[in-house]
Amino acid sequence: MSAFDISNRDYDFKMGQYFSRGWDIFKANALPFIGFTLLIGIIVAVVSLILPYPLGSGNPEAGQIGGNIVGNILSTLLGPGFYIVALQIARNRPTSFSDFFGGFKRALPILLLAIISGVLITLGFILVIIPGIYLAVSYMISLPLLLDKNLDFWPALETSRKVVGKKWFSFFGFALLLGLLNLGGLILVGLGLLITVPLTACAVIAAYEDIVGLNSVANM
C-alpha cells in the first residue's frame, strides 16, 4: 500500500504528552522491553566478535575498522521490534515476546528504508551539515509509518518528511531531549540504556499515535 497520504493534516505538537504516554506504554511491558534491549546487545556483540572482518567488527590493531555487516543488518531488523510492540500496546492489543522479532517479516523494505535514509542523511552532512540534520529529524516517524500503515520504504520516508516538516523545530527539540535521555542512560554505566532505548521508541510511537493515528489492527 502506498496511497496513504496525510501530508495536508495540521496538528499540535504535545511534547510533554508524548513523554508521558511513552512512559505509560513502556511500563505496560517494561520487563520484556528491557529483556529485548539486553538480548539485542548480546546478539550483536557475539556476532561482531565471532565473525571475521568485514562480516564482524574486525581488529583495530590490524587496521580493520568498521565492517560488522551482519551486526548492522541484525540491528536494523531487530530495532523495529520496539516499535511493533509499542504499537500493539498503544492499540490495547495483547503482545508476546515473539512480536519483537516482527521486523524480519518485512526485512526488505526495512533494510531499504535504513539504507536509503542513511545515505541521504550522510550526504546531507557531507554537503553542508544542515541538510543532514533536517533529514535525520524529518525521517523520525518513517519506520512507524512503514510498520503501521504497511507503506513501502520511499512513501514512508516522504510521508514522514512532509508531516514532520509542518512542526520541524518541535520534532528537533523532541529529538534532542530523546538524545539527552539516552546520553543519561549511557552515563549510568550503560545500564540505563536498557530503559532509555525502549522508552525512546515508545515516546516516538506516542507522538505518531497522536499525529498520524493508528491502524486498528496490526499489519505485521
Image (tube, grey):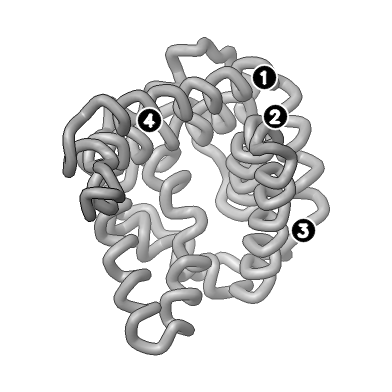
Please state the horizontal and vertical placement of residue 14, each as a whole percent of the image. Answer: 77, 58
Quadrant position of residue 193: top right
Label 4: how many residues lie within 10 Å, few (<14), some (14-19) or many (20+)? many
Which residue is most to the bottom?
A: 128
Residue under label 2: 26
Q: In the rendered structure, which amino acid carries the disc numbered 1?
A: Asn
Q: Quarter holding the C terminus?
A: top left
Question: Disc 2 vs disc 1: Cβ atoms closer than 8 Å?
Answer: yes
Does residue 112 appear in the picture of this structure? Answer: no
- Taking the spot 75% from the left edge, 25% from the top edge, the residue there is 27
SS class, disc 3: loop
Q: In the rendered structure, which amino acid carries the disc numbered 3?
A: Lys
Which residue is most to the front?
A: 61
Q: Quarter holding the N terminus?
A: top left
Residues under labels 1 and 4: Cα distance? Answer: 23 Å
Label at residue 14? 3
- Taking the spot 64% from the left edge, 56% from the top edge, the residue there is 179
Quadrant position of residue 45: top left
Does residue 82 appear in the picture of this structure? Answer: yes
Mark 3 or 4 closer to N-term? 3
SS class, disc 1: loop
Mark 3 or 2 closer to N-term? 3
Position of residue 106 relative to residue 13, above or below, is: above
Position of residue 103 relative to residue 184, above or below, is: above
Mark 3 or 1 closer to N-term? 3
Residue under label 4: 44
Question: Disc 2 vs disc 4: Cβ atoms closer than 8 Å?
Answer: no
Residue under label 1: 29
